[in-house]
Image (cartoon, rainbow, N blue to C red):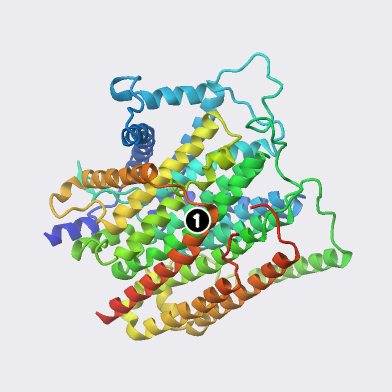
């Protein structure tokens, strides 16, 4: 194993440990803000995985959109709800807990089945990655050839998201104008 | 003229050895720190002169060792923390995160063409990746959290208000910043800053065809680093010192470093994207010198703006970002796309 | 390709090392008062502040701003790869770009008309 490979493994294990640890922290921490901060760490460690898979543009986009934009909105939503430390989450209705366990078990079973039965041979590391794999130019070409419909649908999704967000926000604004600026 | 340059830029004769990259990283980090130290001095000197006073002139000739005096003072300050801190690790982590991310963003900026010395290849930039422009924005979006965490964790009214306002300001202007660059990306057909510099050498400095994009970038850039006239987070009349009110000593100093290094990075980005980067029509070999000269001019303009322009109100600030810069930058991008396709 | 990111890793380690070292030095070399003043740990400035307004909420405007930020950030991430190959795709690519930006412009106008961009 070359020095470069060892380094890749070290980075991989660090990111994996960070990923699992932060994911556990998201669920385990009682304060919404600490959970949100742990989620940021989780999303950044996912970006490291993308990078190790040679998808550098996707990695940068992951940091930019998920760790950057989405989590800022999470924090602002928490600020809107009120960052109160005294009120901790005390657990939702019991059917939610049950549903969560069932969903997690199903996902775990699916992963095990896929890895053990199906993809055991395909998951071996191969070097057959095209030179331009993951660079923005090839992504741009793929957008406008194989995935043209998806590309255009995204703009409609964004439009719907804008309308939905404004409707939610405007309603709140009518209900209780106020709050700190 | 074009051939050897293209050779220098694209077909690097050898790959840089990793320890040369490490030395380069150390040199750049220390250069950034020195630039930060003397920017604080130069800023006070220039501000002083613009207001018909001297500025610091006691420590050494022309106050030249003032930054070191400041540093000693900051380091020696008693490290007390607010009683009602939410979490001590976050309180210390926020400034470290801010400063680290500020340093990290500069790593992709090209400042020279690369040289061969004693058979070793030395690159003119620390990190050369094909998506370097997006990397700057991605790291910039992470550094927002330093501000948000810092303001929130210190459990003080002014810090919290300042952090929220700064957060909203940063995200608003990041959109305008990224959109105003789109015209440059369209013309250079690359997200690599090295390629963008090379493309400007082949055609023309992009400040000429992209003058609208440049204007948007300049305004959004000043706002993104929270400098006057967009220094709302630190509007001392209403918010004391904004998100770092409860920080003192070197914890405050790290926030200060973050602010100045961000300013240097945005200036370097401006030089790279619109003013041909380290290249000049003559004497390519002195790439870093041209780069530093251009950078110094842009940085001077930052100080000049601070001395000359009155601070905006918060609603004016948000209006400027969302209702003026965003549409202009979008229209500029679409118009550029039209001309790129037309040609 | 990963080889290109090695300097990034090295630089990042150095950068975090330097900033961490500064924090450490500020604790190692600092002066410490023998007796801690009783009021030192109170929130700063004039002694009138009673801490963070934890029981109050922030305005919904922050949420709206962040949501719009996500929308336009996604737009930008989709436009960058397109922008690089636009000259090869010619008018087909340009028309797709106009449709994409046009739909977002509709969203933008809607958001503006609904007053979500206002900070009163």
The subunit letter for the residue under badge 1 reads B
How many marks the image carries: the answer is: 1
Query: Which one is nearer the viewer's eye here, B216 or B320?
Result: B320
Query: Which one is nearer the viewer's eye here, A13 or B231?
Result: B231
Quadrant into which the N terminus of chain B falls: bottom left
Q: Residue furthest left?
A: B1
- Residue B113's place in the image compared with B62, above or below, is below
Quadrant into which the C terminus of chain B falls: bottom left
- Residue A11's place in the image compared with B73, above or below, is below
* Residue at x 60%, y 69% (from the top left corner): C115
Q: Quadrant of residue B183?
A: bottom left
Residue underneath mark 1: B317
Residue B129, position as x, y percentages in the image: 37, 57
On screen, residue A38 versus residue C100, left or right, reads: right
Q: Residue furthest right?
A: A94
Task: Classify mark 1: helix, strand or loop.
Answer: helix
* Residue at x 64%, y 71% (from the top left corner): A166
Residue B29, position as x, y percentages in the image: 38, 39
On screen, residue B133 versus residue B323, left or right, reads: left
Judge whether residue A51 can be spotted in this image. no
Query: Which one is nearer the viewer's eye here, A112 or A42?
Result: A42
- Residue B60's place in the image compared with B106, above or below, is above
Query: Which one is nearer the viewer's eye here, B67 or B29?
Result: B67
- Residue B1's place in the image compared with B305, above or below, is below
On screen, residue B25 versus residue B208, left or right, reads: right
Residue C25, position as x, y percentages in the image: 51, 26
* Residue at x 30%, y 55% (from the top left corner): B272
Q: Quadrant of residue C117?
A: bottom right
Judge whether residue B20 can be spotted in this image. yes
């Amino acid at each position: 194993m070359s020095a470069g490979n060892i380094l890749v493994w070290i980075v991989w294990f660090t990111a994996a440990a960070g990923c699992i640890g932060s994911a556990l922290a998201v669920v385990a921490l009682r304060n919404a803000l600490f959970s949100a901060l742990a989620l940021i760490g989780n999303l950044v460690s996912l970006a490291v995985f993308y990078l190790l898979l040679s998808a550098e543009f996707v990695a940068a986009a992951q940091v930019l959109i998920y760790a950057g934009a989405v989590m800022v909105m999470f924090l602002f939503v928490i600020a809107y709800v009120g960052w109160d430390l005294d009120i901790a989450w005390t657990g939702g209705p019991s059917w939610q807990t049950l549903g969560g366990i069932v969903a997690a078990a199903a996902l775990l079973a699916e992963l095990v089945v896929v890895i053990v039965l199906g993809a055991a041979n395909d998951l071996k590391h191969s070097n057959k990655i095209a030179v331009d794999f993951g660079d923005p130019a090839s992504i741009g070409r793929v957008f406008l050839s194989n995935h043209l419909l998806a590309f255009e649908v995204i703009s409609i999704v964004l439009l719907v998201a804008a309308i939905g967000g404004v409707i939610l926000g405007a309603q709140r604004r009518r209900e209780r104008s106020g709050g700190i600026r | 003229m074009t051939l050897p340059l293209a050779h220098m830029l694209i077909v690097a004769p050898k790959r840089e050895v990793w320890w040369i990259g490490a030395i380069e990283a150390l040199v750049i980090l220390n250069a950034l720190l020195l630039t930060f130290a003397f920017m604080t001095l130069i800023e006070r000197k220039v501000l002083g002169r613009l207001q018909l006073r001297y500025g610091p002139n006691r420590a050494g000739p022309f106050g030249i060792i003032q930054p070191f005096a400041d540093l000693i003072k900051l380091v020696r300050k008693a490290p007390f923390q607010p009683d009602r801190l939410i979490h001590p690790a976050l309180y210390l982590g926020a400034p470290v995160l801010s400063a680290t991310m500020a340093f990290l963003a500069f790593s992709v900026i090209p400042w020279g063409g690369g040289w061969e010395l004693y058979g070793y290849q030395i690159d003119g930039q620390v990190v050369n990746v094909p998506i370097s422009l997006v990397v700057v924005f991605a790291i910039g979006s992470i550094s927002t959290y330093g501000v948000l965490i810092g303001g929130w964790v210190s459990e003080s009214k002014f810090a919290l208000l300042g952090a929220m306002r700064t957060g909203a300001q940063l995200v608003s202007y990041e959109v305008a910043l990224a959109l105003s660059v789109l015209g440059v990306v369209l013309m250079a057909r690359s997200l690599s800053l090295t390629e963008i510099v090379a493309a400007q050498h082949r055609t023309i400095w992009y400040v000429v065809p992209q003058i609208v994009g440049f204007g948007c970038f300049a305004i959004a850039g000043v706002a993104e680093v929270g400098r006057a006239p967009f220094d709302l987070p630190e509007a001392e009349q209403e918010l004391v010192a904004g998100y770092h009110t409860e920080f003192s000593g070197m914890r405050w100093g790290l926030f200060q470093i973050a602010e100045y290094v961000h300013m240097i990075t945005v200036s370097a980005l401006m030089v790279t994207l619109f003013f041909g980067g380290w290249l000049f029509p003559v004497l390519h070999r002195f790439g870093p010198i041209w780069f530093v000269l251009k950078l110094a001019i842009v940085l001077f303009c930052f100080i000049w703006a601070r001395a000359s322009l009155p601070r905006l109100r918060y609603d004016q600030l948000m209006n400027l970002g969302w209702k003026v810069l965003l549409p202009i930058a979008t229209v500029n991008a679409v118009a550029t796309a039209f001309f790129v396709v037309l040609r | 390709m990963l080889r290109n990111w090695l300097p990034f890793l090295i630089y990042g380690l150095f950068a975090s090392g330097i900033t961490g070292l500064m924090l450490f030095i500020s604790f190692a070399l600092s002066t410490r008062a023998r007796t801690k003043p009783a009021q030192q740990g109170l929130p700063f400035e004039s002694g009138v502040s009673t801490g963070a307004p934890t029981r109050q909420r922030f305005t919904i405007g922050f949420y709206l701003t962040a949501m719009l930020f996500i929308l336009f950030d996604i737009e930008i991430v989709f436009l960058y790869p397109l922008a690089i190959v636009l000259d090869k795709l010619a008018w087909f690519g340009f028309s797709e770009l106009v449709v994409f930006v046009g739909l977002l412009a509709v969203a933008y106008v809607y958001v503006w008309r609904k007053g979500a961009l206002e900070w009163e």
